[in-house]
Image (cartoon, helix red, strand yellow):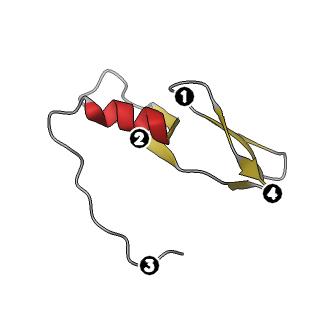
């Protein structure tokens, strides 16, 4: 869950999994976090809803450990 100042600056990021407040300094997230945003569409019970959440790295690892098929991975060679 992300919270913003009135001017749009990132104020806080809280893990939706464990509730831990992640490190944010000067409007910049200073640790690894997984951000998901999905707009549900036709053929779903959530049609028209947008769901957003943030997970700390530990909660992300816990979530994917239950997957039957691992997420695809590729190495990022350039960092912006």
User: Can you tell which quarter of the image residue 26 is in?
Assistant: bottom right
- Pointer 3: residues within 10 angstroms few (<14), some, or many (20+)? few
CB atoms of marks 4 and 1 within 8 Å:
no
Above or below, 75 against 64 in this view is below
CB atoms of marks 4 and 2 within 8 Å:
no
Work out which residue is located at the far top of the displayed protein and give it. Answer: 45
Q: If you read the primary sequence from the N terminus, does the residue marked by circle 2 or circle 1 appear first?
A: 1
Residue 39 picture location, percent across and down: 41, 40
Q: CA distance from mark 4 to mark 1?
A: 22 Å
Residue 58 picture location, percent across and down: 46, 36
Label 3: element kind: loop
Tell me the mark number nearer the camera, choosing from 4 and 2: 4
The answer to whether residue 62 is seen in the rendering is yes
Q: If you read the primary sequence from the N terminus, does the residue marked by circle 2 or circle 3 appear first?
A: 2
In the depicted view, which residue is nearer to us: 3 or 79? 79
- Residue at numbered disc 1: 16
In the depicted view, which residue is nearer to us: 49 or 80? 80
Q: If you read the primary sequence from the N terminus, does the residue marked by circle 1 or circle 3 appear first?
A: 1
Q: CA distance from mark 2 to mark 3?
A: 26 Å
Tell me the mark number nearer the camera, choosing from 2 and 1: 1
- Residue at numbered disc 2: 38
The answer to whether residue 40 is seen in the rendering is no
Residue 23 picture location, percent across and down: 69, 45
Q: CA distance from mark 4 to mark 2?
A: 27 Å
CB atoms of marks 1 and 3 within 8 Å:
no
Where's the N terminus, which quadrant?
Answer: top right
Tell me the mark number nearer the camera, choosing from 1 and 3: 3
- Residue at numbered disc 3: 78
């Amino acid at each position: 869950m992300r919270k913003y100042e009135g001017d749009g600056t990132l104020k806080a990021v809280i893990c939706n999994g464990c509730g831990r407040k992640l490190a944010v300094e000067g409007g910049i997230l200073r640790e690894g976090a997984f951000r998901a945003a999905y707009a549900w569409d036709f053929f779903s019970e959530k049609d028209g809803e947008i769901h957003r959440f943030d997970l700390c790295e530990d909660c992300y690892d816990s979530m994917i450990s239950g997957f039957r098929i691992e997420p695809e991975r590729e190495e990022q060679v350039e960092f912006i």
